[in-house]
Image (cartoon, coloured by chain):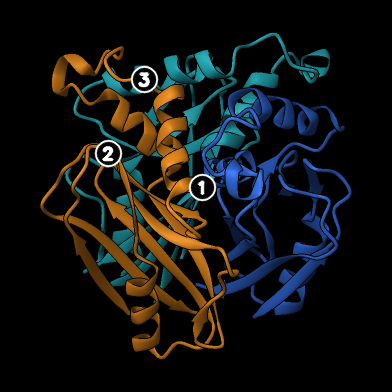
Chain colours: A blue, B cyan, C orange
């Protein structure tokens, strides 16, 4: 089973919790055991598993990446002025693969799935979800 | 096939080699070709493929992450005082997916699978292993 | 379906676009929907999804990793003098898992698959490709 999640982003950098949308697709798939692959289509975006107790960790992720990968100092900036966004996406990674167990995702209590926007705002970001039975 | 590995950790930051435990589950699955997903349940832990010739690389991983992601300077520290642990987990990533070939993992000679603890010690850490046939 | 890609690398650090080779294996597999796992066998190499409009982002990746993970300052250097290569490989990650949709990889326009060499040049690097149906 495969399905697309689409979303709009509102900031240049931001994390968007897509856990419920992914869980819904896992439920629809009726697959009881296996894995679900969550894939960000876009070379300036990524997927991260992270806590969602409040917004603080999400803001800390953006602060950390801005510090490690400052904007405006990359060779690629001469093309698109978004070299930092590509580097952040490459380091965080385009996908996460999560186990499916008893028909649900095997996330722990504090694990949520975030779409990471590094070159927003964008009207139409796509995340491809694939559920595979074991 | 899916199985849980459980372990105790003894330090705040530490890498634990779980290669043999994962290999045993792959053997039990009797799957000859496919992939095995190794997933750390916990938003302050991660999975890394790394060399295990001696302990030096494991200590270097901890040294590097401490340098890049210092403790005590994050917004989330006001909640749990473990902002750095969440960020380390997010950057390293909660899972690795490894090929299964001829009934064994397709690791190279020096590749081992490590559970990365960033907020220990913990009595009961869980890693969910899912073997999927191709 | 599983197949090995082999390549030679010519620099100590370098990114090599393997998108076409992976796409060919996906086509040969005749799998219409599922995922493809791309796995670098070698604890000083990695796989990254990244833009390939020109060489600038690839060079920026190397520049960034050199800055974050300098050479010559690691405990493991006493063994092999390649501590930085292991750390870069661990942070970037040994694999990427990409959706297969309508018989093709679900990459966006600017996403390409790169083998990342961090301890070259090497005559014979191996990347194991596994295509799994959903």
Reply above or below: C112 against B114: below
Looking at the picture, how far across and down is residue C59, in whole percent? 41, 42
Q: Which residue is mark 2?
A: C44
Looking at the image, do the residues carrying marks 3 and 1 touch, with CB atoms under 8 Å apart?
A: no
Looking at the picture, how far across and down is residue A44, in whole percent? 64, 51
Depth check, front residue: A37 or A61: A61
Looking at the picture, how far across and down is residue C94, in whole percent? 37, 48
Circle on res. B95: 1
Residue depth check, mark 2 versus mark 3: number of the one nearer the observer: 3
Depth check, front residue: A106 or B43: B43
Q: Which residue is mark 3?
A: C70
| Distance in Å between CA atoms under marks 2 and 3 | 15 Å
Reply above or below: C53 against A67: below
Left or right? Give the position of A43 relative to A57: left
Reply above or below: C89 against C110: above
| Distance in Å between CA atoms under marks 3 and 1 | 26 Å
């Amino acid at each position: 089973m495969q399905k697309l999640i689409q979303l709009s982003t509102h900031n240049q950098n931001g994390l968007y919790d897509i856990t419920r949308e992914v869980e819904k697709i896992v439920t629809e798939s009726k697959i009881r055991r296996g894995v679900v692959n969550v894939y960000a289509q876009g070379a300036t975006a990524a997927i991260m598993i992270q806590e969602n107790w409040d917004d603080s960790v999400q803001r800390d992720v953006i602060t950390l990446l801005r510090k490690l990968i400052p904007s405006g100092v990359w060779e690629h900036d001469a093309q698109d002025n978004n070299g930092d966004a590509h580097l952040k996406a490459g380091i965080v990674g385009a996908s996460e693969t999560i186990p499916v167990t008893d028909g649900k995702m095997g996330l722990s209590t504090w694990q949520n799935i975030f779409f990471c926007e590094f070159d927003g705002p964008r009207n139409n970001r796509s995340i491809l979800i694939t559920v595979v039975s074991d």
